[in-house]
Image (cartoon, grey):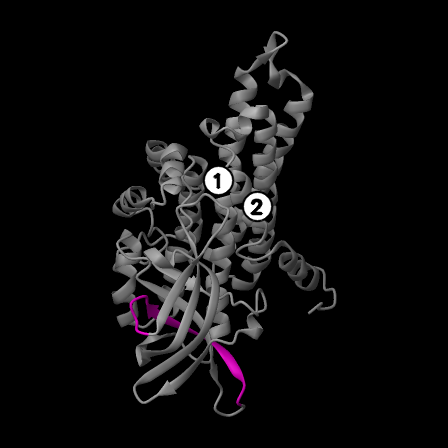
Amino acid sequence: MNAMNFTEPEERVALRAAVAELGKKYGYEYYAKQARAGLKTEELWAEAGRLGYLGVNLPEEYGGGGAGIADLAAVLEELAAAGSPLLLMVVSPAICGTVISRFGTDEQKKRWLPGIADGSRRMVFAITEPDAGSNSHKITTTAKRDADGWVLSGRKVYISGVDEADAVLVVGRTEDAKTGKLKPALFTVPTDTPGFEYKQIDMDIVSPEKQFGLFLDDVHLPADALVGEEDAAIAQLFAGLNPERIMGASFSLGIARYALGKAVGYANERKVWGAPIGTHQGLAHPLAEIKIELELAKLMTQKAASLYDSGDDFGAGESANMAKYAAAEVAIRAVDQAVQTHGGNGLASEYGLGTLVTAVRLGRIAPVSREMVLNFVGQHSLGLPRSY
């Protein structure tokens, strides 16, 4: 999508249509059934990987599609719109795949990218800590050099999908030899590394992907576990966080589309007082407002992806934060109004909406909270004094 073109390229339109077909094959029933049984969406993940959808943003020489984050975001949005959102797409190909593609050594790329691209390997991302929250300057997970590599120690919390991951991209900190100050650094930690432990956090969310606390107790890593330069890690970190926000927005947009579609379908079919309930403006107007807000959020998401893919990391940061904010808000509104449109049926399992009430609420909290987005916009977009 170039600067003055508000229509997607033909290739992406075709990609969306193909992914929508795959999503329809599985849909919400499959997703909810797997989640309620404590199972993963393995079949959908494997088929999406086999068809090349999980790695569309990764370099062709490592098995990817050679396209951008805009195309990967389109894949996630279409799967979510079909009722089968794949949360690990946000972390494995988007964050980890991007960081390794941009900053990894040839050896790291060969080791990880082909598997991430075809779905046979998953890498998840660990930044959040119990006492740091959104403040990445307060991260206490530290990496110290030893004779043949690194020793990593610390804790992480609310890390998605560790139980199905081959490795975790951990944000730690190393000590600057000159100043003694700690600076961020990124490490790949295979999940079977001695000293690496994880424990599931019980959540009131019906989802195949689980959340975990991580415990890193003197985890010995080889020298090549470090991704990129020790001194450039903050730039490397943000190279992964912009795609995370763009993908988070697409995740929310897809669920909003799914909920709005269910609501409109029901409002057209359900008859009370001799006419479809969608005749009444009390239901029609809120759904029309959601459609407007959804299209606006989608445009901002596409703008963010376009800026990111053009290499404008800072410009993408503003748009990606705004997109994530707007998409989370419209997803919450869409699901709430879909439930309201269905009346009591909105919370009956067969109508496929009740589980989304908590799922979309998460979009206001993660991958960055609504308040931190407002801090970013206040400071960077409006030039207001820094609040923290």
Q: Is residue 271 left or right of residue 23?
A: right
Q: Residue at x 64, y 9 (%)?
A: 273
Q: Position of residue 14 (x, y in %)?
A: 36, 37
For the C terminus, the image quarter is bottom right
Q: Which residue is mark 2?
A: 361
> In which quadrant of the rendered view does residue 10 lie?
top left
Looking at the picture, how far across and down is residue 369, in whole percent?
60, 56
**Element under label 2?**
helix
Asked if one can make out residue 300 in the rendered structure from this viewpoint, the answer is no
| Residue visible at 65% across and 29% down in the picture | 286
Residue furthest bottom as drawn: 178
138 relative to 26 in the view: left or right = right
Q: Position of residue 305 (x, y in %)?
A: 49, 52
Could you tell whether 41 is left or right of 307 in the image? left
Q: Is residue 160 visible?
A: yes
In this rendered view, identify the residue nearer to me: 229 or 132.
132
The region drawn magenta spans 180-194
Q: Quadrant of residue 104?
A: bottom left
Q: Answer above or below: position of 386 versus 265.
A: below
Crowd around label 1: few <14 · some 14–19 · many ≥20 (10 Å)? many
Say what amino acid the circle numbered 1 marks. Gly
Q: Find out whether residue 28 is within the magenta segment.
A: no
Q: Is residue 381 left or right of residue 218?
A: right
Q: Which residue is mark 1?
A: 254
